[in-house]
Amino acid sequence: MNPVPAQAGVPDQPTSFYWSGEAIRSRSVSPVLLSGLLEVPAPPPRLLADWNQEVAVQLGLEPGDVETLPLARARMRWPDYRHCVQAVADWTRGLGLQEVLASSEVALMACRGTRYHHDAAHYGGAAFCNLFLSEDCGLDLHFASTGLRIPLQRGTVVVFDTGQPHAVIARHRSGFDAADFAAEMDVTQVFLTWELPIEAPPVVQALGIVFDIAAQTALQLQDEQLWLDGAPVQLVPESGRWCQVD
């Protein structure tokens, strides 16, 4: 896949207020999505069995849940881990992100779908780079504000703004339905995720971020949040529609 610039037809984008050092700063939320499909080796059966055990026994994932898996332990049973990381590093470098990935924090995650959410309330100072490691089980990564859907399969890689509403939903659905992720269904997705610093110049250029767009409001805030049309907003978890904060 080539990078997808999700610009045309995008509705008004929210403003992210995030911690920059010791102060809250404002910035635009980018509608740009960068996606690709990389050739990465399948995780070994022993590691897949370990993940399945962890998901079933330790995490107890419910529909819509996203939890962390132990990366350090996984790397001991994952000889191709470095090849996966190198593939993503080469891809991001080709997009002009230079060496940002190498200096970014990485985590291993698992989900049974996800309800519509944004991550700017905790990661407003970052963009996400995700590499999906599971086989295609009929799920899409859906961005509610742009309508873009990315089929999830082993090697799917994406970079996006943490303020963009998104969910992992069944391919035949237009929204999140917990029934699509029942316990007996094999729909768990495992992925690596990197936090790319939003103020890094290559990330700014790739996503088209504009800073200090609501500087006076930022001075009055004490925590990270998203605003739209001059007020804080949240998401309807099943549809991804914006609504006013209660």
Image (tube, helix red, strand yellow):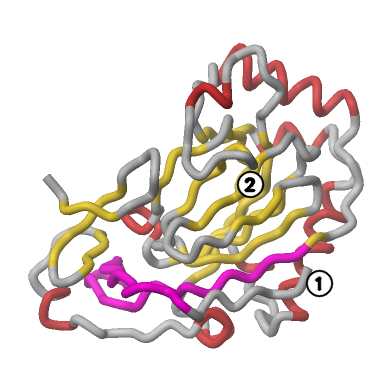
- Residue where numbered disc 1 is placed: 90
Q: Position of residue 143 (x, y in %)?
A: 50, 57
Q: Position of residue 181 (x, y in %)?
A: 58, 24
Outermost residue, left side: 220
Which secondary structure lies at badge 1? helix
**Residue appearing at x 57%, y 17% in the figure:** 182
**Is 104 placed left or right of 209 in the picture?**
right
Look at the picture and state if 159 lies above or below 189: below
Please tell me whether residue 24 belongs to the stretch shown in magenta: yes
Q: Please name the amino acid that badge 1 sits on.
A: Asp
The residues bearing labels 2 and 1 have C-alpha atoms spaced at a distance of: 24 Å
**Is 242 placed left or right of 87 in the picture?**
left
**Residue appearing at x 83%, y 63% in the figure:** 87
- Residue where numbered disc 2 is placed: 140
Q: Which residues are magenta?
A: 9-36
Contact between marks 2 and 1 (CB within 8 A): the answer is no
Mark toward the start of the polypeptide (2 vs 1): 1
Query: Closest to the observer: 162 or 78?
Result: 162
Look at the picture and state if 82 lies above or below 201: above
Please tell me whether residue 99 belongs to the stretch shown in magenta: no
Residue 237 found in image quarter: top left
Residue 43 found in image quarter: top right
Look at the picture and state if 52 lies above or below 57: below
**Residue appearing at x 48%, y 52% in the figure:** 166
Query: Closest to the observer: 225 or 240?
Result: 240
Q: Position of residue 111 (x, y in %)?
A: 58, 34
Which secondary structure lies at badge 2? strand
